[in-house]
């Protein structure tokens, strides 16, 4: 679908979307290929209507670090892969600087469809809008399935929406950054939980007035994740 155009949902799709949960669309399989294929048909919330496509996670099943972003951006929505836009390129540089190699990393987003609004004045640009807590919660079953498929040793939260997917609506990056949090996955027998490192989204680095300092802070946080693996 071309940017700016809206899909028309049939009545059945509307009834499914009104449930506001992806749970009915998530298969029992924990094959990443099977999960990704099933996610293409997800109607768990209304975001699919204006998105070009579902953007599922990417990376090896053997990855030890799960990078959790907010949602696909404009380029990710068009390409169909996470972190392929300007923020993703910056993230690649930060990962390399922190000593995290590609085979160690699985990338995904808390929300799998791009939420946007038209540019004011009839422009062609699609303006990013943060997902609502309801949309984050609706998409959470996909994240839980990805976690169970990859079973990473460390999760890196990139931004507020990603943190809210794990810890709820009261989560704040400013309160949690600089500490190692613990997340206890539902349906998991692990008593100790999973280490979670909290940092800013790379797009926040791009918007920073002092980009060099912001980039350095992101690298420091990613180094914390790398150290936890050792």
Image (tube, grey):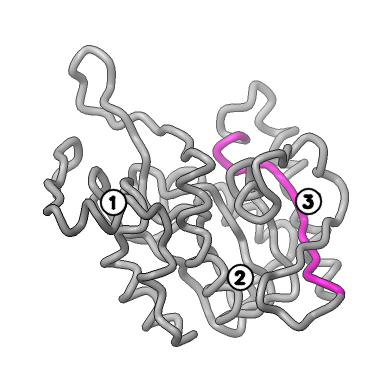
Number of the front mark, 2 or 1: 1
* Residue occupied by mark 3: 221
Q: Residue at x 12, y 46 (%)?
A: 8
Is residue 76 visible to the viewer in this orientation of the structure? no
Residue with the most extreme top position: 121
Q: CA distance from mark 2 to mark 1?
A: 26 Å
* Residue occupied by mark 2: 105
Q: Is residue 144 left or right of residue 224?
A: left
Q: What x and y, as percent, mark residue 147?
A: 60, 73
Q: Are marks 2 and 1 in contact (CB under 8 Å)?
A: no
The span picked out in magenta is 192-204
Q: CA distance from mark 3 to mark 2?
A: 15 Å
Q: What x and y, as percent, mark residue 91?
A: 58, 51
Relative depth, front residue between 225 and 93: 225
Q: Earlier in the sequence, mark 3 or mark 1?
A: 1
* Residue occupied by mark 1: 48
Residue neighbourhood size for the residue with mark 3, other residues' Cα within 10 Å, grouped as few (<14), some (14–19), many (≥20) = many
Q: CA distance from mark 3 to mark 1?
A: 32 Å
């Amino acid at each position: 679908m071309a940017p700016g155009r809206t899909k028309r949902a049939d009545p059945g799709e509307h009834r499914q979307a009104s449930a506001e949960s992806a749970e009915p669309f998530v298969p029992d399989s924990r094959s990443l290929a099977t999960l990704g294929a099933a996610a293409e048909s997800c109607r768990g919330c209304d975001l699919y209507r204006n998105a070009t496509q579902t953007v599922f996670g990417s990376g090896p099943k053997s990855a030890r670090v799960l990078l959790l972003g907010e949602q696909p951006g404009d380029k990710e929505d068009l390409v169909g892969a996470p972190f392929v836009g300007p923020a993703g390129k910056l993230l690649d540089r930060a990962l390399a600087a922190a000593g995290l190699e590609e085979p160690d990393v699985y990338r995904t987003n808390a929300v799998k469809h791009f939420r946007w609004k038209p540019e004011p004045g009839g422009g062609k640009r699609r303006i990013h809008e943060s997902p609502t807590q309801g949309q984050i919660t609706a998409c959470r079953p996909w994240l839980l399935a990805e976690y169970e498929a990859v079973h990473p040793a460390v999760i890196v939260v990139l931004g507020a929406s990603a943190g809210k997917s794990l810890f709820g609506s009261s989560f704040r990056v400013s309160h949690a950054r600089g500490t190692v949090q613990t997340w206890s996955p539902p349906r998991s027998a692990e008593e100790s939980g999973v280490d979670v490192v909290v940092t800013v989204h790379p797009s926040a680095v791009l918007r920073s007035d002092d980009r060099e300092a912001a980039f350095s802070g992101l690298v420091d946080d990613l180094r914390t994740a790398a150290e936890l693996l050792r």
